[in-house]
Amino acid sequence: MKKKSTQGLNRREFLKTSALAIGAAAAPAIVRDAFAATRDRVTVYTSSFAESLHPYKHSSSPIYGQWQHIFEPLVEYNYKRKDYDGVLAESWQFDGKRWTFKLRKGIKFQDGTPFTSKDVAFSIERMKDEKGGSLQGSNFKDVTEVQTPDDLTAVFVTKTPIAVFLDRLENRFMLSKAAVEKYGADWEQHPVGTGPYRFVSYQRGGNLVFTRNDDYWGGKAPIKEIVFRKVTEDAARIAALEAGQCDFINNVPVHEVARLDRHPRVKIDKIEGLRMFFLAFNMAHKPFDNKLVRQAASYAVDANSIVKNIFEGIGYANQGPVGANVVGADPKLKRYPYDPKKARELLASAGYPSGCDIQLYTSPGRYPKDVEVCQVVGAQMAKAGFRVELISQEWAIFWETTGVNGGKLPFYYIGRGNLTDADILYDQYFRTGTTKRTNYSNPEFDKLIDEEQKAPDMKKRTAIMQQAGKILMDEAVFIPLYNLADLYGLAKNITWKIRPDEKVLAWDMAVK
Amino acid sequence: MRRFRHFKVFVGGLILIALVVCGLAAPLLAPFDPQEQSLEARLQPPSWAGGAASAHWLGTDNLGRDIFSRIIYGSRISLLVGATTVLLAGLMGCFLGAIAGYFGDGVDEVVAKVTEIFLAFPFLLLAIALMAFLGQGVINIILALMMSRWVQYCRVVRGEVLSLKEREFVTAAKALGGKDFYILLRHVAPNTLPSVTVVATFAMAVVIISEASLSFLGLGVPASIPTWGSMLSEGRSYMSRAPWLTIFPGMAIFVTVFGINLLGDGLRDLFDPKLQRQ
């Protein structure tokens, strides 16, 4: 009897202590959350969060943005100028099989050691070392050597001339050779770079904290500390922003925009995103081998109506084969107008007077409102005589050799992210043999892509890609739909320069 | 007490009958084509709640489809999947349970191990795994739910048969020269029916919920077929703006499952000899 009561007491004691412990652990969190955005600290709740601090583990653009607080690349794409800016590199020169980079003088790592061409050569070696966890090696497979004639010159020697080499240096961050060698296997836990912020702490799936690097070569950023926290659930991010627990969130769903915009302490910022959505035909499959059928389908789909009704008007219908901001876009091109009657006629002249049965494939949940979009597409195409069966597949089955990349899907809804240059899409989807995604083959088109990839001058490249784009539109090899907006929610006292690449960078922000 | 039991069976049965009528007479009852989209008329509230101008009794969804018609058509899938699964899983489970219980020994061991393997998986997880493997489709969903649902029948029937086979009437049948399967079919099986009926009604409720869950996760039937689960899933992003997208299909699931459970509960009480004697 006595024993029993002691046990009860113990349990009660235990509960009491654990309650106290939990309370104690939660208290600092509550106090911190009570802060609004200040110059001292901005808290970002993000759906994309760095899975490690190894900057060569392949990742998405928003995660590059997090790493970029510590590490810097040689060059960076400037979306306004549509060309590259030097970051660690001051100038560069393309000369046959050699790319020569002059580095900026007087740059120091956060541990005080100088940044030199040796660090560049070392970093590229690490990127090529795929056993060491790098997934970026393919960018440098043609690089035979990185020469370092002096501390401020790095020369990349390549097997063949590569005009588009700057693109491969995008998001390729420079490590400190000295620091990596000092920490050895443990270097990931001690990231040292040249960036405007220093590393403070990181918990996988928790917080990632950076503090300002006051010795930064490019001048002091206005915000002292930035905290990234992983919150994948949309509703949780929104609730936290509304409650003032965080100052900044990414990926606001379109249907929440109107409501959040009315919130007294919150504003919405948006920019045309770099992901382009489209409907792709695989031309190895009937009936899409027939150009008339593809044109009929192009007339049958009303992208403007989808943007207006499904995405609340927050989107940008494509006029040509790529979005207006993409290098190689042609302002003269127009999309096929919505004309179900014309579509029906074309379908009849293609040999399908009583319509035809097709399947539209999608992977639900991969993209915003994908199933809704496909249902609307199905209904629109039905007016032109297509009988559309909608088939949903798991992403792995949809995307791998069982699906798109095996050339198995005749017609599918897809988005191509990070599309800054038309070449990315044209080469990957439509050049003979690059992938099986569309099985399009046109020697004339292939020749243009070859030419464009070797052209050293941006103007010339653009002109060639515009020619290529016109062929794609005439042949109706796919149905371009729209780019969506990247939507951010932020506290009203923050001003920031929004970027189209999904990166959230502390030095783009200021707090009033 | 007894009157209350009848009441449960009555109300539950009525709900089930209403469901069957909805499913069978869907084209007659539904005022609109459930697939017809009208993007201009999307997210209209129910006609009796602010949507006065709208002809849609329960409003329209995110693509401008009539919610009332979709709920009526959605009952077809619930009913079809529910009834077929319960029947097929029942046949499979009862058969295996009966031979396991009756013959015992080796057969029993094998069946017991197989049921344990199936029971080791959480029911819905097994169904999700099977759906991911098989792909979408009405037949696939029935198969997936059946594979994860037959075990309950098997266990109940096995237990019943174990006790029934020791009873005098079975011994008598054996003494009269009855063959095993004859005895199983004529003398043992009919006596398991009350328990099987109760298991079946509860199974039906679970299956309807599971189908809705799978459709909610996008693993159910193709998007072109309206189901309550997929209606919930599509409507959930509009919860704050257009709650009727989720409230009505949610209520449909709730009322149906409640009704079937009520029926099962009532039947169990009716069949229970202990309660009957009171």
Image (cartoon, grey):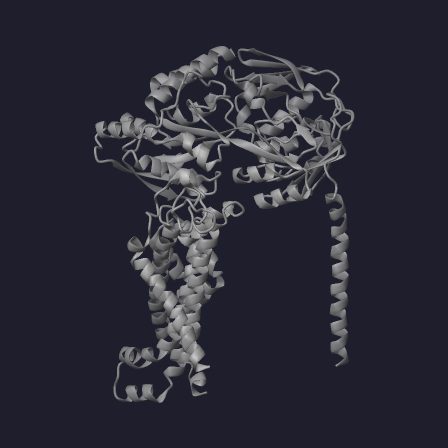
Relative depth, front residue between A395 and B267 = B267
Task: Let me know if residue A161 appears in the view.
Answer: yes
Among the 4 quarters of the image, the one containing residue A89: top right
Among the 4 quarters of the image, the one containing residue A481: top left
| Residue A309 on image: x %, y % | 44, 36
| Residue B18 on image: x %, y % | 35, 63
Relative depth, front residue between B151 and B87 = B87
Q: Is residue B236 above or below residue B208?
A: above
Q: Residue at x 34, y 25 (%)?
A: A476
In the image, taking residue A50 as reference, residue A346 lies left or right, namely left
Q: As drawn, which residue projects farthest toward the front? A: B52
In the image, taking residue B87 as reference, residue A130 lies left or right, namely right
| Residue A500 on image: x %, y % | 57, 27
| Residue B255 on image: x %, y % | 44, 62
In the image, taking residue B23 as reference, residue A112 lies left or right, namely right
Q: Is residue A461 above or below residue B175?
A: above
Q: Is residue B46 above or below residue B148?
A: above
Q: Residue at x 42, y 71 (%)?
A: B264
